[in-house]
Image: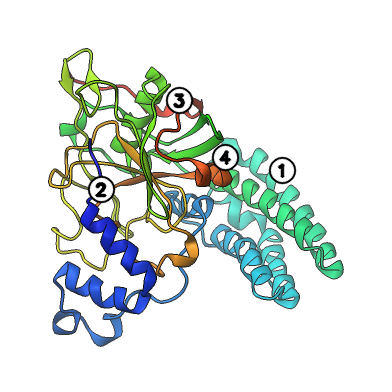
């Protein structure tokens, strides 16, 4: 069975017990002496809080460039942080004021939207404006639950708005992978398990080959009836191992194991890196666009020594956000994240080895799946 290294698992388990020691061990593990080749201002791990919400990570991963809408997004996302920090009502009011100022200048947002989509986006802007005003009233009465619900609804609108700004697929996938399915956009997958329902969004903008393979297998019904074969508390939940001796998907057209290359898009790069870990590429401090910083990150499993040996086995990352170091994780750049859980956290928390996927269905975005172009 394909799996993550037990050595890495044991390492990560001890890492949770002592985060300061973990930083030192990261350096040892990677074989880096940052002081020797990195300016002192850049030698430490990234500062600030890692984004631990899968929906937020998906928004930031969209290939768009519009500062006002990112400011709107950040202001609304910050509300939950302030509610957790002893309910800082003044800070929440400031966040909403920032959002309102952005929405008062809709032309700056509409400028990034194709003309045929602008009427719908204008309607969303009007709805957002009304929603922000309503949240300001809720702040006055300090209604935490209603504020959170309203914030989530507004961020769903922001997601739709940002998705409307995407103008075509942002890069060309290397021709050598034309024999594999590719996802030129995003898809939403509904997964029914014996413990309840999960919803995941897979991101072809950042990992078109990895996401395309998964969506293709879902569409084929490959995961229907499969068990979760490995579970480690606060680590991973893995599935995708078919019955019999095979450990991955055997393409019925070729009779061969469908091998998927390691595919990681790094922040600032125009296209993914293929077939090599970021560590082996010497990119020790570079961060993937889709990081392992959210509970329910969905990634491709592979043999430990074969970076291009993944196929059908995938795993959910189960670290609690509070235990994830800001902006740094030992799995980042070694395994390919290609989506995030967006609904069903409480269900994912309950699933163990032996539980079963009853069905997996593409409920949105199947039109973005591109079939293989070569045998």
Marks 4 and 3, how far apart at CA: 25 Å
Q: Label 4, on which residue?
A: 115
Marks 2 and 4, how far apart at CA: 47 Å
Residue found farthest to the bottom: 40
Label 1 vs label 3, nearer the camera:
3
Q: Nearer the viewer, residue 304 or 153?
A: 304
Q: Earlier in the sequence, mark 1 or mark 3?
A: 1
Helix, strand or loop status at disc 2 = loop
Helix, strand or loop status at disc 1 = helix
Residue drawn at (63%, 47%), measured in percent from left and top? 156
Asked whether disc 2 touches disc 4, contact meaning CB atoms under 8 Å apart, the reply is: no
Marks 1 and 3, how far apart at CA: 26 Å
Would residue 364 be found to the left or right of residue 147 on screen?
left
Q: Label 1, on which residue?
A: 123
Q: Label 3, on which residue?
A: 366
Marks 2 and 3, how far apart at CA: 30 Å
Label 1 vs label 4, nearer the camera:
1
Q: Label 2, on which residue?
A: 4
Bin the neighbour count of mark 1 within 10 Å (Cα to Cα): few under 14, some 14-19, many 20 and up: few
Q: Nearer the viewer, residue 176 or 124?
A: 176
Residue drawn at (50%, 30%), measured in percent from left and top? 191
Give residue 58's mark: none
Residue 293 screen position, x and y as percent: 42, 59
Q: Earlier in the sequence, mark 2 or mark 1?
A: 2
Would residue 284 be found to the left or right of residue 267 on screen?
left
Bin the neighbour count of mark 4 within 10 Å (Cα to Cα): few under 14, some 14-19, many 20 and up: few
Bin the neighbour count of mark 2 within 10 Å (Cα to Cα): few under 14, some 14-19, many 20 and up: some
Residue 187 screen position, x and y as percent: 46, 33
Residue 71 screen position, x and y as percent: 57, 64
Q: Earlier in the sequence, mark 2 or mark 3?
A: 2
Q: Is residue 32 visible?
A: yes
């Amino acid at each position: 069975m394909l799996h993550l290294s037990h050595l890495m698992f044991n390492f990560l388990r001890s890492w949770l017990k002592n985060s300061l020691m973990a930083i030192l061990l990261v350096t040892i593990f990677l074989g880096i002496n940052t002081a020797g080749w990195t300016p002192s201002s850049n030698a430490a791990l990234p500062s600030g809080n890692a984004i631990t919400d899968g929906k937020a990570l998906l928004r930031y991963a969209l290939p768009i460039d519009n500062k006002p809408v990112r400011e709107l997004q950040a202001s609304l996302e910050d509300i939950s942080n302030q509610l957790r920090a002893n309910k800082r009502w003044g800070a929440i009011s400031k966040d909403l004021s920032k959002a309102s100022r952005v929405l008062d200048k809709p032309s700056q947002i509409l400028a990034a939207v194709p003309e045929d989509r602008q009427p719908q986006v204008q309607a969303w802007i009007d709805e957002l404006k009304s929603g922000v005003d309503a949240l300001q009233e809720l702040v006055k009465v300090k209604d935490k639950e209603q504020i959170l619900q309203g914030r989530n609804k507004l961020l769903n609108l922001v997601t739709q708005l940002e998705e409307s700004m995407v103008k075509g697929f942002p890069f060309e996938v290397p021709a050598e992978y034309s024999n594999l399915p590719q996802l030129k956009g995003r898809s939403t997958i509904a997964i029914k398990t014996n413990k309840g329902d999960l919803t995941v969004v897979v991101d072809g903008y950042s990992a078109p080959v990895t996401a395309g393979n998964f969506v293709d297998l879902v569409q084929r019904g490959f995961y229907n009836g499969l068990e979760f074969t490995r579970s480690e508390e606060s680590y991973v939940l893995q599935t995708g191992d078919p019955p019999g001796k095979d450990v991955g998907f055997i393409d019925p057209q070729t009779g061969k194991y469908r091998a998927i290359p390691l595919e990681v898009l790094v922040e600032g790069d125009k296209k993914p890196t293929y077939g090599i870990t970021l560590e082996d590429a010497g990119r020790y401090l570079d961060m993937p666009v889709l990081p392992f910083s959210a509970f329910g990150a969905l990634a491709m499993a592979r043999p430990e020594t074969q970076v291009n040996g993944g196929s059908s086995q995938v795993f959910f990352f189960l670290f609690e956000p509070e235990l994830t170091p800001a902006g740094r994780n030992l799995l980042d750049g070694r395994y390919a994240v290609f989506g995030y859980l967006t609904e069903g956290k409480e269900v994912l928390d309950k699933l163990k080895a032996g539980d079963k996927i009853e069905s997996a269905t593409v409920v949105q975005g199947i039109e973005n799946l591109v079939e293989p172009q070569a045998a």
